[in-house]
Amino acid sequence: MYDLLLPGSLPFLLILILIGVVLLYTGPKLRAAKRIWLTSTLCTYWLMSTHLGATYLESLLNRDVTSITANIETIDADAIVVLSGGGHTLGNNANTINIASTHTAYRVLEAYRLHKKLPEVPIILSGGIGDSLALSISESEIMRKELLELGVQDNLLLMEQNSNNTYEQAINIAMLMTRLDMRSFILVTSHTHMKRALATFQTQDLYAIPSAAFHTTTPALRIKWSLFPNKTDLDRSQNVVREIAAYLYYKQQGWIAIADDFD
């Protein structure tokens, strides 16, 4: 149901086309409106489906966000905090397989990269069962399994399995870090999610060192002049629209209480 109101999604596109078709059967007085509606729908979705359009939209959220690359070993961090980004449980009557989403997988890889430079620093894995219809175990447990397979020692992995959104993650991690007497930490999440995560954590008086997990092999701010539409770039654009909507919702709820460029 949520996707019905989300620009970039297939249901939203079908609604726009339906309105356009209805306009086609109206009288000649709305001739200009018909052309504008259908042309703007086509152009908007075409641009959102290109690398150029998706990269531009992502740049609205991550102008100052990057991965930590220089002097990682010198960072005085009490923990590496990894926020989950979804997962799926696939199964039949006998067995199940739990799979990390693309967002979660890249966050795990970023956490592992940091772990190689800071091998003694604990890793806090945060995420519960965000969608009980799609997942049977917590997203943090999925991340734990992947990091164990990569060779991270189990005693370095701390679990936070009760949160179902970024706000709850900030609340629960604040309590966990207080209990463990931790103060400084590196925050790992997707580059498009980092702005909302940092603002939510800052509202809870948690000031993190961000290290973004990028989903592409090329820097997010490097725009390629490709105007060929594809589903991958449409998904990227839709994710940005979702993040902006979520950010504004968090502001309205008071979960983000800092001044920023969205005010």
Image (tube, rainbow, N blue to C red):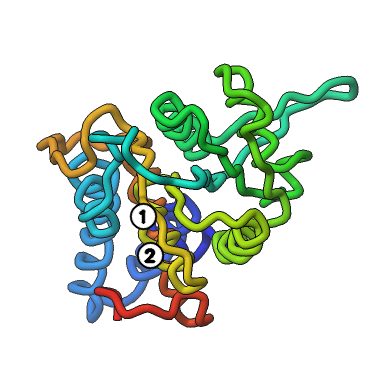
Residue 226's spot in the image, x, y percent? 15, 35
Viewer-side residue, 68 vs 104? 68
Residue 198's spot in the image, x, y percent? 41, 61
Asked if 121 appears above or below 189 in the picture, the reply is above
Give the residue type at disc 2: Ile
Q: Quadrant of residue 87?
A: top right
* Extreme-right residue of the structure: 93
Q: Quadrant of the C terminus?
A: bottom left
The kind of secondary structure element at disc 2 is helix
Label ID, residue 160: none
Viewer-side residue, 102 vs 255? 255
Query: Could you tell me if residue 150 is visible in this image?
Result: yes
Viewer-side residue, 21 vs 76? 76
The kind of secondary structure element at disc 1 is helix
Residue pointed to by mark 2: 244
Identified at 46% across, 50% down, the residue is 185
Q: Quadrant of the N terminus?
A: bottom right
* Extreme-left residue of the structure: 225
Identified at 58% across, 26% down, the residue is 147
Contact (CB < 8 A) between labels 1 and 2?
yes
Identified at 37% across, 68% down, the residue is 25
* Horizontal side, residue 39 vs residue 190: left or right: left
Number of on-image labels = 2
Residue 253's spot in the image, x, y percent? 53, 81
Give the residue type at disc 1: Val
Residue pointed to by mark 1: 240
* Horizontal side, residue 208 vs residue 136: left or right: left
- Crowding at dot 1, Cα within 10 Å, few <14 / some 14-19 / many 20+, comes out as many
Identified at 27% across, 51% down, the residue is 65
Viewer-side residue, 199 vs 29? 199
